[in-house]
Amino acid sequence: MDKPHDMFDRDHEWSALTRFIEDGRAGATLGVVAGRRRQGKTFLLEAAVQAAGGFYFGATEAADAESLRRIGEALSSHLRPASPFHFQHWAEVIDVLLELGSQRPVPVVIDEFPFLARANPELPSVIQDAYRPLREQRMNSRTRLLLCGSAMPFMGRLLSGNAPLRGRAGLELVVHPLDYRAAARFWDIDDPRLAVSVHAIVGGTPAYRREFARGDTPANWDDFDDWVTRTVLNPETPLFREPRYLLAEEPDLRDRGLYLSVLAAIATGNSTRGGVATYLERKATDIAHPITVLEDVGLLHRDADAFRDNRSTYRIAEPLITFYQSIMRPVWPQLERPGNATRVWRGSRHRFAGNVVGPHFEQLCREWALYFADPDLFAGLPARVGHGAVHDPRTRTTSEIDVALVGVADGGKPPLLAIGEAKWNDTIGAAHIDRLRTIRETITANGKFDTAHTRLLLFSGAGFNDKARAAAAETGDLVLVDLATLYR
């Protein structure tokens, strides 16, 4: 299948779909495609169906009888049988879909599958029965059935545990947001500082540029403030209310006020479970459930402390929600008044630097260390990256580390490949280097990690002074990473 010329990136996803759809072996197969909303799943699957000559059906929230009628009408239009289809049960539908692949491999997509399964919980079992290993209709078919959905908890359970479809699927594909480098190319941004600032607001969600911002991109750094006020802070654009809709579209979020408050707590720096509970004036046990639900739907991400096993922090996985909670929600009535965006943004710029882009920059530095850094930079293959707190029993002080890169343990203590500090608006100097060296000595004394080859990483959005550059030139264990390096 030839990938459409207007499809940006997604080479991995397109290759996976191509291999699955063009598999010429006999026997119908099943695939599952999942991903949060606005990532381009529908565009990807419709393009695959068009390229291979298949069938696409987009489900909606409806009663089971209406969905059966709609897919019957869609199949009648697609196949043009002597008499239109009138399905009474999903087993009849699945058999017709299997018949589509009687002559050649044919992709069949059922988009927003969770809508159908919620209206008829037996549907996964119906598909399981239709895909029995020795069933004649399956053996004689080469239908490549793809079930797609945006409800991440539901899609995650579809093939897990004792679920009916466990063991039936030959493809499980998750469509993620674009990584920060691909997002910069997608938005046609060459300036790394501008790229970080834009990514801190809209992340790597493709729809936010093409549909929601109507192709409006900041021309340069001087245009950034105007771009913010004419897009995400503009009540006339879909981006303005998108953060609220993201929460409203999640069926598992019932007490939305509570979930909004949990997100607000984390956005303002209360990143531990105890911190969230204190912010909400509740017990820690009371907020365990909303935090778990937000994790399940993909809006929260839990980061284990790299140095203390019993400590975790939480961060919001969707940058637009962080921006909304930090910048928009506190002054929502002012933003709803037309023409007030510039005034609000001028008064919110300091919060954007401290609460939004600063923490976001730290996360991009962690992603660079794990996914993009030259493998020869470290003494081993990175296994995980995180951040954490290092306690020094001698001075009874605790130091925060922004980047901690841990290697693969080979029978002994896990190697600590690197520790790092990330500063968005600060120029890195000798004091930052001395601090990291002291922390490395403390970690060595604590004895949990092998620090024989631990390198020191210093990330800065504002640059490095002469002393820092001289120190990096003199020693081989110090690496300075500027914005250009992050995007190179």
Image (spheres, rainbow, N blue to C red):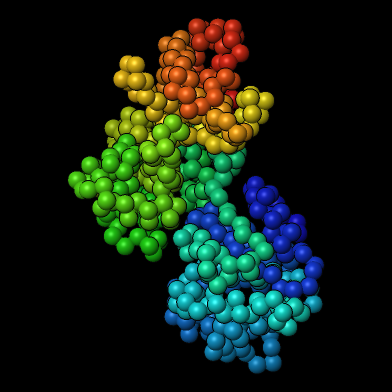
The residue shown at (61%, 88%) is 85
Q: Which residue sits at x=47%, y=24%?
A: 447
Question: Which quadrant of the figure has residue 351?
Answer: top left
Please say if 281 is above or below 307: below
Place of residue 377 in the rendered image (x, y in percent of width and height, measured from the top left): 64, 24
Q: Please give left or right for residue 353 compared with residue 382 in the image.
A: left
Asked if one can make out residue 231 in the rendered structure from this viewpoint, the answer is no
Above or below residue 205? Residue 363 is above
Q: Nearer the viewer, residue 180 or 216?
A: 180
Furthest-front residue in view?
A: 411
Residue that appears at 54% across and 37% down: 384
In-image side of 150 versus 380 (left or right): left
Of all residues, the one furthest to the bottom in this rendering is 83
Total numbered badges shown on the rendered structure: 0
Residue 398: % across, % down? 34, 23
Nearer to us in this view, 326 or 365: 365
Between 461 and 144, the one lying in front of the other is 144
Residue 475 visible at all? yes
Task: Locate residue 436, reporting x and y percent.
Answer: 46, 17
If the image is split into quadrants, where does the C terminus sit?
top right
Q: Measured from the top left, where is residue 153 in percent x and y?
A: 46, 60
Query: Which image quadrant is residue 353 in?
Result: top left
Classify residue 173 as left or right of residue 388: right
**Residue depicted at x 47% and y 81%:** 64
